[in-house]
Image: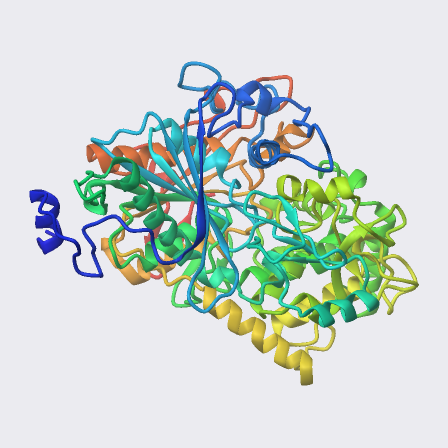
């Protein structure tokens, strides 16, 4: 039982005191971490709304994006509408037959087209020791139930902006009549054009003036001029170049978003006193708070639960979380009768730089070359062959032929890096989309707290033409960056540029490395990133020296800052993850976190883990031939996880035990997905499907 405080007595009696203790003030106060003004907007649910920006479910599913009346001068409303459209579709498969409109979507389970009337509050906030503003937002639907208040956290997935979780935690929370609290977690677009000095304001307007913006590089005018003279038309990007390692504060960002949520709710619903002040009547002890979201957002909510000393969070429900567990080799992981995995819990940068280096060659392995969907379309075979040859020349793969070299590259990823074979068919598509390459570049910068001027591994960000040469970004594209960028280039016309490519600075994907005479995807730059992650030269294994060693040490320190402890403080929690995840390999994320949590919390753990067969990380890819016929939407199981947590917290329903769920692909895109393809998480799964801890091993059924 929580102790009764003076503030609680004040709230109960309505006594008109002007203050209470600073740690728990009775009166509603704007949190001190909020910077500047709070923007507030009302949405009627007809012309505009919280969830679909007035587009409705059909508008979100439309292949035609909402346009700007004036492409060079979009309004704040237009920018918001396009941002919601892009962020929703980036995570949710809206293609016909994939479940949208039948199993999930804004209009499923409600009347109308899914539009949600309510109020939206947007602000910038800060954390001690960081100069970088963090975006926070609260959405309060008109249907919010003051008598049974609830709140859902929605930190953005990936490096997306504040609307990044609109289609995941946002949709579920709003349809449950909860307030939803969002944060970009210090990532987001935050693009700073170093040539014209333009950056985005809180609502996405471009400015070169000294007003608050999402991000501006920490350069003096002289430093910026010097940089532009040598590297014209470049961009600084918030996640990569903030010098802040935002991930180290992701948990705090989420907790602050919850605090801001309570402030907003009490401004709306708190008891109004005659002196004009409001009492805190909506508080953690009478409000249900679920920490949620997917991918990076899921990892942020996990960190928030670990750091929650105030008892703000009641439960956790996340999907495919990007979580870097503390390395604990006292337990192992084993799937079926497969090998015992002890080298689990590699960091994001470790396994991602390995994928960036080896996957381009592995794409040509006979075992997957012709089976991987869209492989040849996204990955020209000639480039893959060049990468294989460059790797072989450096002694990093073996074999006399490209087939042999590619097979060895695939073996290295699956065996030496414990990346699941189930991801092999999707990995080529992800490489073609530059997923590992962009993550490697962004996080190497972020973990080391580097600035844009440091140009780690000779990489920078700029628009490029058809040949790969650097060009200015078109003004209309720049005006849309807030709405179109995912916060981690390549995105919205801005690409990764290898400044030391043969000939001239070139789009990384088209680059010729100095050590090669053929286009090899700038392999030298990717190997440089790999060296920083492993602290040694990839070719020789020799320790780094000088500036490279210092930079690698800074990277290692940054990684240590983001490691999760496994201690959820006894909170009930649900993780769902797809076994075929090709971005966040499960032997280094969800699985070892489950094992670590058991080591830390023992039998008192409230964590349940549901591993979904034939599901992966990016449901939006299910709209492509060769993907949607093989995989089911993990999104469906994420919503089920939230439903299970809701029932547990509101009705006392026990959470089902950890288990493998054997989802069934539809086999043909012409066959609409049905519930028959998506068996539920069961309250009493068969023994053959249970995920268990036995001795010092986490056992996962095949």
Q: Residue at x 54, y 30 (%)?
A: 632
Q: In this view of the protein, which residue sits in the foreground, 645 or 50?
A: 50
Where is residue 61 shown, x and y percent of the image? Answer: 60, 23
Q: Which of the 4 quarters of the picture holds residue 172?
A: top left
Q: In this view of the protein, which residue sits in the foreground, 679 or 694?
A: 679
Where is residue 688 shown, x and y percent of the image? Answer: 38, 39
Q: In this view of the protein, which residue sits in the foreground, 337 or 483?
A: 483
Q: Residue at x 39, y 63 (%)?
A: 331
Residue 405 shows up from this direction: yes
Q: Is residue 597 above or below residue 675?
A: below
Is 143 on the left or on the right of 192, as rendered?
left
Is 459 on the left or on the right of 576, as rendered?
right
Q: How many marks?
A: 0
Q: Residue at x 35, y 48 (%)?
A: 260
Where is residue 494 shown, x and y percent of the image? Answer: 74, 49
Residue 594 shows up from this direction: no
Where is residue 537 shown, x and y percent of the image? Answer: 70, 76
Q: Which of the 4 quarters of the picture holds residue 150?
A: top left
Q: Which of the 4 quarters of the picture holds residue 564?
A: bottom left
Judged from this view, the residue extending furthest toward the top is 112
Q: Name the colouring of the figure.
A: rainbow
Q: Is residue 293 above or below residue 306?
A: above
Judged from this view, the residue extending furthest toward the front is 275
Is 307 on the left or on the right of 169, as rendered?
left
Judged from this view, the residue extending furthest toward the bottom is 546
Q: In this view of the protein, which residue sits in the foreground, 526 or 184?
A: 184
């Amino acid at each position: 039982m929580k102790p009764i405080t003076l503030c609680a007595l004040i709230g109960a009696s309505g006594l008109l005191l002007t203050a209470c203790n600073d740690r728990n003030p009775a009166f509603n106060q704007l949190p001190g971490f909020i910077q500047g003004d709070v923007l507030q907007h009302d949405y009627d649910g007809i012309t505009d709304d919280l969830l679909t920006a007035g587009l409705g479910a059909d508008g979100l599913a439309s292949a035609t994006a909402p346009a700007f009346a004036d492409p060079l001068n979009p309004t704040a409303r237009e920018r918001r509408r396009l941002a919601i459209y892009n962020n929703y579709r980036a995570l949710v498969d809206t293609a016909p037959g994939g479940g949208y409109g039948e199993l999930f979507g804004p209009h499923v389970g409600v009347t109308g087209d899914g539009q949600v009337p309510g109020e939206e509050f947007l602000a910038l906030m800060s954390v001690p020791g960081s100069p970088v503003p963090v975006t926070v937002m609260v959405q309060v639907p008109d249907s919010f139930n003051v008598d049974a208040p609830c709140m859902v956290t929605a930190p953005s997935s990936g490096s997306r902006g504040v609307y990044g979780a609109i289609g995941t935690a946002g949709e579920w929370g709003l349809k449950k009549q909860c307030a939803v609290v969002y944060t970009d977690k210090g990532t987001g677009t935050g693009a700073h054009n170093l040539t014209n000095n333009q950056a985005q304001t809180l609502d996405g307007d471009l400015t070169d003036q000294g007003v608050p913006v999402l991000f501006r590089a920490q350069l003096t005018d002289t430093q910026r001029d010097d940089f532009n003279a040598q590297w014209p038309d470049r961009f600084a990007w918030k996640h990569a170049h903030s010098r802040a390692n935002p991930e180290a504060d992701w948990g705090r960002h989420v907790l602050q978003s919850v605090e801001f949520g309570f402030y907003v709710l009490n401004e709306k619903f708190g008891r109004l006193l005659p002196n004009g002040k409001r009492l805190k009547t909506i508080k953690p002890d009478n409000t249900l708070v679920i920490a949620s979201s997917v991918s990076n957002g899921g990892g942020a909510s996990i960190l928030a639960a670990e750091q929650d000393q105030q008892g703000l969070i009641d439960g956790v429900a996340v999907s495919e979380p990007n979580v870097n567990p503390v390395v604990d080799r006292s337990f192992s992981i084993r799937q079926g009768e497969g090998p015992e995995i002890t080298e689990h819990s590699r960091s994001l940068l470790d396994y991602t730089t390995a994928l960036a280096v080896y996957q381009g060659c592995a794409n040509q392995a006979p075992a997957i070359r012709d089976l991987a969907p869209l492989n040849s379309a996204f990955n020209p075979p000639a480039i893959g062959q060049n990468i294989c040859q460059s790797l072989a020349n450096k002694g990093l793969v073996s074999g006399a032929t490209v087939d042999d070299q590619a097979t060895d590259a695939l073996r290295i990823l699956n065996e030496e890096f414990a990346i699941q074979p189930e991801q092999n068919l999707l990995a080529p598509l992800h490489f073609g989309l530059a997923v590992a390459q962009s993550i490697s570049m962004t996080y190497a910068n972020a973990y080391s707290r580097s600035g844009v001027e440091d140009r780690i591994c000779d990489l920078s960000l700029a628009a490029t033409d058809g040949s790969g040469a650097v060009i200015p970004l078109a003004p209309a594209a720049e005006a849309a960056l807030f709405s179109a960028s995912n916060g981690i280039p390549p995105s919205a016309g801005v690409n990764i540029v290898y400044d030391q490519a043969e000939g001239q600075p070139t789009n990384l994907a088209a680059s010729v490395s100095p050590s090669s005479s053929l286009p090899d995807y700038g392999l030298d730059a990717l190997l440089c990133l790999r060296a920083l992650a492993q602290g040694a030269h990839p070719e020789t294994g020799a320790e780094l020296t000088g500036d490279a060693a210092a930079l690698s040490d800074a990277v290692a320190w940054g990684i240590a800052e983001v490691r999760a402890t496994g201690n959820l403080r006894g909170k009930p929690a649900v993780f769902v993850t797809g076994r075929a995840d090709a971005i966040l390999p499960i032997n280094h994320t969800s699985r070892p976190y489950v094992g670590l949590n058991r080591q830390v919390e023992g039998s008192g753990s409230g964590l349940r883990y549901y591993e979904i067969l034939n599901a992966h990380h990016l449901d939006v890819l299910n709209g492509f031939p060769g993907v949607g016929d093989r995989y089911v939407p993990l999104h469906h199981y994420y919503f089920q996880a939230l439903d299970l947590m809701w029932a547990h917290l509101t009705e006392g329903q026990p959470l089902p035990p950890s288990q493998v769920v054997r989802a069934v692909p539809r086999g043909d895109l012409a066959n609409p997905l049905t519930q028959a393809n998506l068996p539920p998480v069961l309250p009493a799964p068969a023994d053959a499907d249970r995920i268990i801890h036995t001795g010092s091993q986490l056992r996962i059924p095949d």
